[in-house]
Amino acid sequence: MNVDEALEAVETVLLSRKLSPVERLVLRQSWFGQTYGEMAQDSAYGIPHIKEIGSRLWHELSQALGERVTKKNLHLLLARYQPNQISEQHGKLQPEYQTYTVANNNFTDSLPQVVLEFPSGPVPLHSALYIYRPPIEELAYTEISQPGCVIRIKAPRKMGKSSLLNRIVAHSRVLGYKTVTLDFQEADETIFASLDKFLRWFCVNVSRQLNLNPRLDEFWDEDMGSKVNCKIYFEGYLLEQIDSPLVLALNELHQIFEYPSIAQEFLPMLRFWHEQTRAVEIWQKLRLVVVHATEISIPLKLNQSPFNVGLSIKLTQFTSSQVQELARRYGLDWTDESEMQKLMAMVGGHPYLVNVALYHLCRGNMTLEELLQAAPTPAGMYSGHLRSHLTLLREDTQLVSAMQQVVNADESVQLEAIAAYKLESMGLVELDGNQAKPSCELYRLYFRNQLGDEHVFDARLSQPEQEQQDVQPLRNIDQLTQLPNQRYFNQYLEIQWQQLLREGLPLSLIMCDIDYFRFYNEAYGEPAGDICLQQVASTIRSEVKHQAAVVARYGGEEFAVLLPQTDTNTAMDIAETIRESIKALAIALEYPGVGGFPDEVLTVSLGVASTVPSAQTSLEKLVDVAEDALYKAKRLGRDRVSLGSL
């Protein structure tokens, strides 16, 4: 038995599942006698992670073989169990791997025995519980045969992305293609320390799965840059060494979005590789399949993102006939459809929610009525799934407010475009334009209860109205001035930027700083300084009458005013009005023993920046320009408004 035969026996017979890339690495390198330290050095995984994966793998193999498996006896034990012998001696493993007859997406009446496992991961390749969603699979199988293709699978979590990916990869193997699957959940935190480290990890893992020795040092030149090195490594080594197309499947790609500096380089690199297929023949060997959850996004220029080329597959919910068929495969007699309709009234056709319900019903843990009653409660069978969505919602106060509107309304409601898009991406609402309704009754009931007493800052209300309703959460409000704080301001700025980017409308920002405030605090004391800050905050707020504007305490004696859909001239007028109104407060400014202040009353300096958001600029640039304009106003003598230019 060689190592490839050992891998095949472990995956197809002993464990009845595909090993992850790191599990394959541990098994393969253990077969060749490598230590965990050597594996870590070659693969860029951490030693503790390698050890943990190895320990779990040996334990799982020990249970399958009925004997203790270790790195040292791996050869001896597996050599005694050829694949056909294992099948004969472990007949209980066979039913899951029988060949099923499929016609028009319906199994024959004599279904094989279904091995029930809680639906917590991808549906195994030969499982009777996988439901085809025509024409998705057919489209993917056809596309993967096209030179240089890109397939993009996107959906909220738990919609079946990995199950579909595994079938595309399996189909590719039937076609005789080389396949490599990378799951970015497996990468250690340290891998994302730099682009160079990440791309080296990427290249090493692809090499290992292709059974090629990593030769990075021969192709890596620090003067060339990491992306060029990675391209040369693929073009000059990996693609040259294989005599068939290579399907590179990148699962859980959204994990990279948490590292913007990596994502902003890696994703455009994939796009460039795809474009190379038109000019360089060897790149036609590469077929990309990228899978990502839609809950997380990263802003990329449209001409750099790999997410707007190739075949886009958006996984949808099951239809009623598909839910009915799945119930039949679980062994439930729902021929009159009333049970199916009751279940779908609660969870819709969400694949994970449906499978969990059918699993519990099939095991006889509870009746359908008991299940439906417990489903939307914090102690129900969906508690983990619901809590994860609740956590994401609470990270964005605007989403909390939007979701409250949706779940408390009897009909669909109109939402602000960005909030509507984000909630749809999470799978929580269905959209008709900007009109939103809960995607299932489970979400309506759960979030109505969980968000019922939560208060959020609703930027659509004027700030005086907002204060009267007292709906600003404490974490987003500055307690002294009762203005939104910098945390909330940054969130709102990002939302407005994305919205106005799509609408092509202007956005203006005013940065305001109290002149000589340090001297004022020293002369009159901090209590007087606090009163001064409150007066200034109240004055700025009263002078900003734009419905969607936000006035925030940006830090110390600095304030920020965000003005959506406001051009430069209007923003300059508002800034000048603020300056004059604060000076008119006539707050005395005298510092004993120090003379020479330009005015005897408190004044402010202001910087203004305006732009129409586009792919050629950024919200960070808008803030920088407004800050520079503010400092320019101070350098020119304070008590004035200065305009910056993007």
Image (spheres, grey):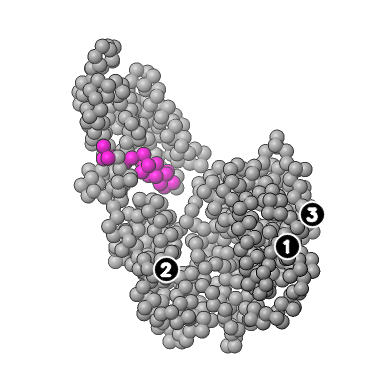
Q: What is the secondary structure assignment of the residue under circle 1?
A: loop
Task: Give the label on residue 382, or none.
Answer: 2
| Residue 157 seen in render | yes
Task: Give the label on residue 532, or none.
Answer: none
Q: Give the amino acid type for the residue marked by disc 3 in the picture.
A: Gln
Quarter holding the N terminus is bottom right
CB within 8 Å, label 1 to label 3: no
Q: Is residue 159 left or right of residue 187?
A: left
Q: Main structural element of the magenta stretch: helix, strand or loop?
A: helix
User: Within 10 Å of the Cα at label 1, are there few (<14), some (14-19), or many (20+) other Cα atoms?
Assistant: few
Q: Nearer the viewer, mark 2 or mark 1?
A: 1
CB within 8 Å, label 2 to label 1: no
Residue 55 x/y as whole percent: 63, 61
Q: Nearer the viewer, mark 2 or mark 3?
A: 2
Q: Nearer the viewer, residue 232 or 76?
A: 76
User: What residue is shown with label 1?
Assistant: 72
Q: What is the secondary structure assignment of the residue under circle 3?
A: helix
Residue 64 x/y as whole percent: 65, 73
Q: Is residue 539 left or right of residue 20?
A: left
Residue sitting at x 53%, y 49%: 257
User: What residue is shown with label 3?
Assistant: 241
CB within 8 Å, label 2 to label 3: no
